[in-house]
Structure formats: C-alpha cells, structure tokens
Image: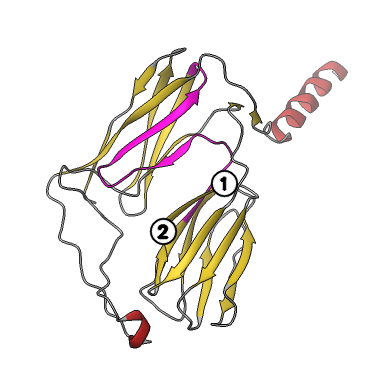
Amino acid sequence: MKSMIAIIAAAVALAAAPALAYEGGAVADGSTVSGTVKFAGTAPAPKKLDITKDQEVCGATPHMDESLVVGSGGGLKNAVVAITNISKGKPMPTTGATLDQKGCQYQPRVTLVPANAPVKILNDDGILHNIHTFSKKNPPVNRAQPKFKKEIEEKWAQPEAVELRCDVHAWMNGWLIVQDNPYYVLTDDSGTFKMTDVPAGEYEIKVWHEKLGEQTAKLSVPAKGETKADFSFAQK
C-alpha cells in the first residue's frame, strides 16, 4: 500500500513539475527547414480603413486593412511559422524587438520577440497613443504614451500571440508573438520562410495567422539536410 502511495505521489509531482527550459548551444550537423504559406483561392480586396481622429497625422496617407495580405502568387504575408516542441538547439536571440507607432499604425504589424526580452515601444507620431494588450498567459498592459514620451519598454514572459490595440485610434491593431525557443520566423511578401541550424529530430511545426487561424504538421528533420514544409489556408 505504501509503495502504491509513493508511486502515485511521484506521478503527481512529475505532472506538476514545470517543463524543462530551452537549452541553447552549438548545433552539429544542423539542417534547414523552409517552405511556403499560401492562400487558397482568390484573396478578397483589402479594405480602406476609416481614419476618425488626428487627421493631420493619421490621415496623411491612406490606411488599408493589413489583417490579410496576399501576394501575386498567393503567398501569405505575416504568417508565423514555428517549431513548437524543441528543447535544445541553437542559442536564443540576445536582443529584443522594436515596435513603432508611426503614421498611426503599428510597424511592424506582427512583431516577433523572445520571452523575457525587452520590447522597445516607440512613438514617432508626436500625438497621444497607448498600448493595450489582450493576452491569456501574460498580464495585460495598458499604458498611455503621450507625445513627449518617445520610448517605453515592456517584457512578456510567457509564449503566446498577444493582440495589440490603441484605445485612442480604434483602427490601430497588431500582434506581438512571444516565443520560448529560437525556431520561429515570419513569412515574407511571397509567403516564404526559412529556419536554419535545426537539429535532426522529429518535431511539430505550427503556422499561425491572425485572421486564418493555425495549422500544425509533423516534421522529420535529417542531419545536414533541408526539409520542406508547405501550407495552404482557405478563407474562413
């Protein structure tokens, strides 16, 4: 009976134990993972956003909805491709990220940052902005950034996709993608991506897009090779 109790207690303790932290270092015989993320079908025409405040700054140029940007070949821009279940590989990035508020838009629209790394939030517009975040794992942030405060800094500890909004300008929104390993990348204008120095192994690869959702796939990475991973999203 005592031995059974001990086994149960050990199992409970193991289940409650935190996951091992990512271990970064030199990668021998690393591989490349590359591919494309595409939009299936005909992409809808982007909509022009209504600029309802601070016209002299925000209305200087037309603003289009950038929640779905599709290139001429169907490539999906601003999709985040990440390996989700890797515990050891190349070192984590040593620098954080910069998020600008310029022309009353978040630039870039999707910002990638390692967990616990500093994010510099700039206000280039010379008017009042604020950063309001909506998250599930990280505490929410809601900070005013008046014109005289050109830079503030924040950190996010837990990996997740964090939505950004400006309560002053209702059309302003973006995303902060917090990651706990270095194997993540944003697709370019043609929907292509590339990750390097991936150790050989069996992994799960995930693609996230703010409007189209998520897809996952199994990924088998050989030593000193190149693995292709292509994805296609349909309109929801």
Which residue is nearer to you in this view: 153 or 211?
A: 153
Residue lying at 54% horizontally and 82% vertically, measured from the top left = 147
Residue 63 lies, in percent from the top left, at 27, 72
What's the magenta region? 176-201
Q: Is residue 49 above or below residue 78?
A: below
Question: Circle 2 sits in a helix, a strand or a loop, which is it?
Answer: loop
Question: Circle 1 sits in a helix, a strand or a loop, which is it?
Answer: loop
Q: Which residue is mark 1?
A: 159
Q: Earlier in the sequence, mark 2 or mark 1?
A: 2
Residue 90 lies, in percent from the top left, at 58, 28
- Residue 24 appears left or right of 61: right
Crowdedness of circle 1 by 10 Å Cα count: few (<14), some, many (20+)? some
Name the residue type under label 1.
Answer: Pro
Which one is in front in this view, the residue at disc 2 or the one at disc 1?
A: 2
* Mark sitting on residue 194: none
Q: Which residue is mark 2?
A: 108
Residue 88 lies, in percent from the top left, at 61, 25
Residue lying at 46% horizontally and 74% vertically, measured from the top left = 166
Quarter location, residue 64: bottom left
